[in-house]
Image (cartoon, helix red, strand yellow):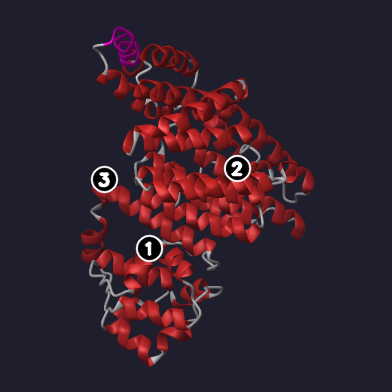
Amino acid sequence: MDASSAADARQGHPISADVWEKREMREALAAREVSAVYRNLRKEGISQRQIAALTGQSQSEVSEILKGRQVMAYDVLARIADGLGVPRGYMGLAYDEATEIQVVGAADEQQAEEDESVKRRNFLAHAAQVTMGAAVFGTSPQAWGASPARTPAPGHIGMTDVRQVEAATRALRALDYQYGGGFCRDAVVAQLSWGQQMLDSSATSPVKSRLFVALADLHSLAGWTSFDTGLMDSARGHFANALELAKQGDNNPLVANILYRMGRVYLHQEAPNDALKLFQLGQIAAQESGSELAIAVLAANQAWAYAMMENEEQAFKLLGLAKDEFARANLAEAEDWVKFFNETDVYAMIGTVHTVLARKVDLKHTKYAIPALTKAVGDYGEDMQRSKTFNLSALATNHLLEGDIDHGARVGRAALEAAEGLKSARVKDRMLPLKEEADKRKNNPDARDLAERLGTFYAA
């Protein structure tokens, strides 16, 4: 990035460049005393939450550093410097090619687990930068995705053109919910290849602003359908583009929703700590928007992350917040992209969180999971077949954990039947706990039959 681009990128950053020129700060940076840096930032009015969001750390990590924990790892120091906007030279962090290979990993090792964690950190840093207000548009070092071949768009567009994009997104999202991302992802990407061209069309300011939001939502759907079909890098690229467009459109509820969806990708990858950071970033955007429904979504998913981290207390606290915010929300006036989170989804999230806690912490959680999941399964219609399948699988898992094996096997078979026809790579991943619990109980004929059926399903 050249000097002018770097200057542009700093505009709108919550930390003034002048902060880094103060004597106390320069001394702390030179000594790499991150705790002193953070304390000085607090004196400048930068909150602990802002520091966490900008650096991609949890608030508990920031708290520990403020109390004196040392930061030694190069990649962590570099991420802190970049997130806060510190000139790397002030911390003695030269970044040549050799160092890049050492920190990030060689390019031909992209499938390694450590590289995936680097990709997660890079996205988190990008998300923090966008969410906290830095002007990153057009200056991001990440190539978030290759541009597909495009059909020429009109030279001038109006609200009718934008409404067509919005209508297409709604229709394609409905197909995703009912049949899975594999059924409609190509159509979503094709719609994007045309819609993206509209950014170069002339339009009034209100039309442009609404177009930013419409394309952000379409990119978000492309990210979600990519995730559902197992295309993680593609998902990450679309979500990154969605974030920037949503921020340009000044739409904080959509920013929150995009961060929620990318956090779900990380939950799926068994990275709850990284997911939690994205959910917390999303909650900042949701609170700024005043959308109770968006806050409820983010709180429920934070509860899921805490459950995966075996933190019962925080999981309960965030579930309570989700229920309270949902009760306050005006569903009739909610934005389209948040309306999926209705009462049925609240029950599904309660059941999901308690299912994780039942497997990881204490079997007592089945008594909370089973009624919530039963309610969700009963209320999901055919238009939400994928969600119904997920919840049937979790419900069957809880019955097996409780020792009600014959009933668990019946529900498990229903989950397998519901999965037929779905084009979703996530279904097999979400049914793994059921397979594991059925395999453990093969001495029981019902469990053995279910295990064999699941084995056939996974072999297909």
* 364, 48: nearer the viewer: 364
Q: Which is in the foreground here, disc 3 or disc 1?
A: 1
Dot 2 lies on which element? Answer: helix
Q: Which of marks 3 and 1 is nearer the N terminus?
A: 1
Query: Is residue 318 toward the left or the right of residue 362 in the image?
Result: right
Q: Give the range drawn in magenta.
A: 444-455
Residue drawn 63% across and 35% down?
Answer: 343
Callout 3 crowding tier (Cα within 10 Å): few <14, some 14–19, many ≥20: few
**Percent position (x, y) of residue 353?**
45, 38
Q: Which of marks 2 and 1 is nearer the N terminus?
A: 1
* Circle 2/circle 1 CB separation < 8 Å: no
Instruction: Residue 78: give its label.
Output: none
Residue drawn 43% across and 55% down?
Answer: 277
Quickly name the residue at label 2.
Answer: 218
Q: Which of marks 3 and 2 is nearer the N terminus?
A: 3
* Circle 3/circle 2 CB separation < 8 Å: no
Residue type indicated by callout 2: Leu
Residue drawn 47% across and 36% down?
Answer: 226
